[in-house]
Image (cartoon, rainbow, N blue to C red):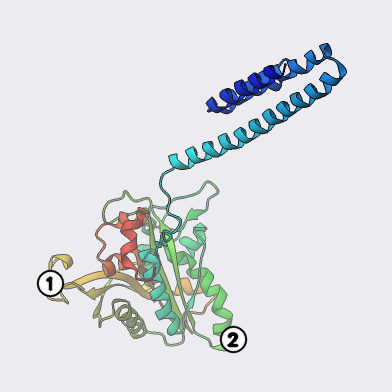
Amino acid sequence: MDEQIVQLRAQFEEKLAAVTAVAELEEIRVGFLGKNGSVTGLMKEMGKLSPEEKKAFGQKVNELKNFCTEKISEKQSELARLEMEREINSMPEFDVAMPAETKRGSYHPITLVQRKCENIFRSMGFAVEDYSEVVTDYECFEALNIPKFHPARDMQDTYYLENGQLLKSHTSAAQNAIYKKYRDALINEGKPIRAIFPGRCFRNESTDACHENTFFQMEGVMVDKNISISNLIFFMKTMLSEVFEKDIKVRLRPGFFPFVEPGFELDISCLICGGDGCPSCKHSGWLELCPCGMIHPNVLIEGGIDPEEYTGFAFGLGLTRLAMMKYGIKDIRDLNGADLVNLDQFTDDK
Ligand code: DAH
């Protein structure tokens, strides 16, 4: 019977050495140590032996059993380790010492221009206001001297919401709220109203290189006693010279907007040719940049300000246009395109 034990052990070792998968190992375990396994079978045969033989034999069978259990568990760990090595080796190479990707995104060109304008106007005592993108018909039109059915509404193909509100078609829509917010300080404390309000505007335009349904403007107003067109020209010239970092010449042409009287188109000397005439300015030497004017008395009245006592100017700077000019962006659609590589090139501030 001892021989049986030796044979069984040899068999077990041979089979175990050939194992390459967990499933095979389990088969061996059942084959040797399971209820009907060979080692368990030896135990059953012990009944035929004398009590002395039984003791010695039992000990040997037990040794064999422990030996098998231990070897199976060792093999199990080895297989698990091999499996993990296989997985690691099949992974793409990964260098833990490699420095992290340093690209952190960048500011959008419109954000850059907007911040620059905000800083310049802040330094001249203007408050920077934020305003909602969904506004009422009153705010966007009626308070600006554009009554219902006025033909000036046709110039702004507006998106209306089902509840009668609309997506603001110009930043002028915030004017009325600004007057109401600051008029007490103006009237009671003599503090001039000076505010700019940049914002996103929406119009139902078919898009091409120069038109977009979503664009940015920056509106500005100043109201006080004795405000005149000279004040308007001074602020615009100062601001534009700072934005473009060179002395900019401006000129005013008449322009019609119901909320200003008189109204102007403000042109700047061409940035490319300096005013001599080139293809960019259609050989005129001037670029149209910023509509503006003296605030219409009806608009002041809607804001609760007496036009007999106070006057003011307003302007609606095309921020998108300004960014395109400053950075030489030829297609307006690039600004809303979310192409990070494209938008990344305008800022050092990364
Ligand atoms: N809101 C006008 C538009 O988008 C632009 C404008 C013109 C604004 C004259 C003004 C202004 O403040 O005085 O077409």
In-image side of 69 versus 324 (left or right): right
Q: Is residue 228 visible?
A: yes
Q: Position of residue 20 (x, y in %)?
A: 53, 28
Splitting the image into four quadrants, where does ligand 1 fall?
bottom left
Q: Nearer the viewer, residue 303 or 49?
A: 49
Q: Report which residue position mark 1 lands on.
A: 277
Q: Nearer the viewer, mark 1 or mark 2?
A: 1
Q: Do the residues bearing badges 1 and 2 touch, measured as CB atoms within 8 Å?
A: no
Tag 2 residue: 188
Residue 258 in sight from this viewpoint: no
| Relative side of 92 to 273, left or right | right
Q: Residues within 10 Å of mark 1 (few under 14, many from 20)?
A: some
How many numbered marks have been drawn onto this rendered protein structure?
Answer: 2
Question: Which residue: 37% across, 65% down?
Answer: 110
Instruction: Please tell me which residue is depicted at 82% across the width and 14% down the height of the picture.
Output: 49
In front here: 43 or 100?
43
Q: Quadrant of the C terminus?
A: bottom left
* Residues at marks 1 and 2, CA–CA distance in whole angstroms: 50 Å
Q: Quadrant of the N terminus?
A: top right
Residue type beneath disc 2:
Asn
Q: Position of residue 271 (x, y in %)?
A: 21, 73
- Looking at the picture, tell me which residue is in the foreground, 169 or 312: 169
Circle 1 SS class: loop
Residue type pointed to by label 1: Gly
